[in-house]
Image: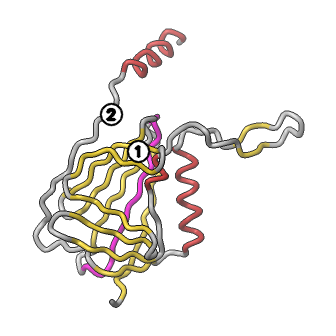
C-alpha cells in the first residue's frame, strides 16, 4: 500500500502542467448574445452557492481546530487556488457582441472583454492565470487556469428562442474535484 501511495505521489510530481486548448474564433451563424439580461435566481442564494463552490475547490482547508476551545475556525486564505478572483458576477448583464469579441458588463460596474479564440495570460493585481476563450458549437467558453492548477470554466449558451442566457460556471480543484452551478438570465427590455 505504501508503494502505491509513493508511486502516485511520484506520478503527480512528474505530471506536466495542464495546457489549455484554444477554442474557435469563428462565431456560429445566427448566434448573438447581445442585449440586456437579468439574473433569475435570488442574488443572496446565488452568492452563497458561488462561495461554497470556491471553498470546496480552492485547495484550502477553511476550517481548522482551535486547540484551546476544541472548535473550528476559518483559516487564512494565503495559499491555494486563486482563479476565483477572475470570476465577475452581477444580477444584470449588458452583453455587446462584435465580430471579434464579447464585452460583458456586470451590474454596470465591471466590463470583461473576451476575444474570440484568445489564448493569453490575464492579470488582476498580482494574480496571474492563463485564459482561453472562444466558440464551442453555439456556446461561448472561457477557461481560466491558475498556477496551482485550479481552473474556472464559464460556458454561455442561449435558449432556442434566445430569450434566456445560461451561464454555467465550473470550479475545478488542482486535484480535479469539480463544483458546478448555473446562473439563468432572462432577456430584459432595452
Residue at the bottom extreme, as displayed: 189
Number of callouts = 2
User: Which residue is at 20% across, 74% downward?
Assistant: 32
Residues marked 2 and 1 touching at CB (< 8 Å): yes
Residue that mark 2 sits on: 18
Q: Residue 174: x and y, percent?
A: 45, 36
Q: Taking 116 as reference, is 29 above or below it? A: below
Q: Earlier in the sequence, mark 2 or mark 1?
A: 2
Q: Residue 95: x and y, percent?
A: 31, 74
Secondary structure, mark 2, is loop
**Which of the numbered marks, if any, corresponds to residue 163?**
none
Mark 2 neighbour class, 10 Å CA radius: few under 14, some 14 to 19, many 20 or more: few
Q: Please tell me in which quadrant of the rendered image residue 150 appears.
A: top left
Residue at the front extreme, as displayed: 125
**Image quadrant containing the C terminus:** bottom left
Report the span colored magenta: 162-175
Residue that mark 1 sits on: 151
Amino acid at each position: 500500500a505504501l508503494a502505491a501511495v509513493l508511486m502516485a505521489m511520484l506520478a503527480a510530481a512528474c505530471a506536466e502542467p495542464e495546457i489549455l486548448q484554444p477554442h474557435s474564433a469563428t462565431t456560429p451563424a445566427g448566434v448573438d448574445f447581445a442585449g440586456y439580461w437579468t439574473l433569475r435566481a435570488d442574488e443572496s442564494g446565488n452568492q452563497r452557492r458561488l462561495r461554497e463552490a470556491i471553498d470546496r475547490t480552492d485547495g484550502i482547508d477553511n476550517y481548522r481546530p482551535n486547540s484551546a476551545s476544541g472548535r473550528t475556525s476559518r483559516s487564512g486564505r494565503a495559499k491555494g487556488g486563486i482563479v476565483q478572483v477572475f470570476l465577475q458576477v452581477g444580477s444584470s448583464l449588458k452583453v455587446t457582441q462584435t465580430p471579434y469579441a464579447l464585452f460583458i458588463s456586470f451590474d454596470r460596474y465591471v466590463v470583461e472583454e473576451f476575444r474570440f479564440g484568445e489564448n493569453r495570460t490575464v492579470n488582476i493585481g498580482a494574480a496571474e492565470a492563463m485564459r482561453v476563450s472562444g466558440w464551442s458549437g453555439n456556446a461561448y467558453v472561457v477557461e481560466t487556469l491558475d498556477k496551482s492548477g485550479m481552473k474556472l470554466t464559464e460556458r454561455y449558451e442561449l435558449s432556442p428562442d434566445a430569450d434566456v442566457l445560461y451561464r454555467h460556471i465550473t470550479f475545478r480543484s488542482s486535484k480535479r474535484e469539480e463544483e458546478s452551478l448555473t446562473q439563468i438570465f432572462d432577456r430584459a427590455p432595452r
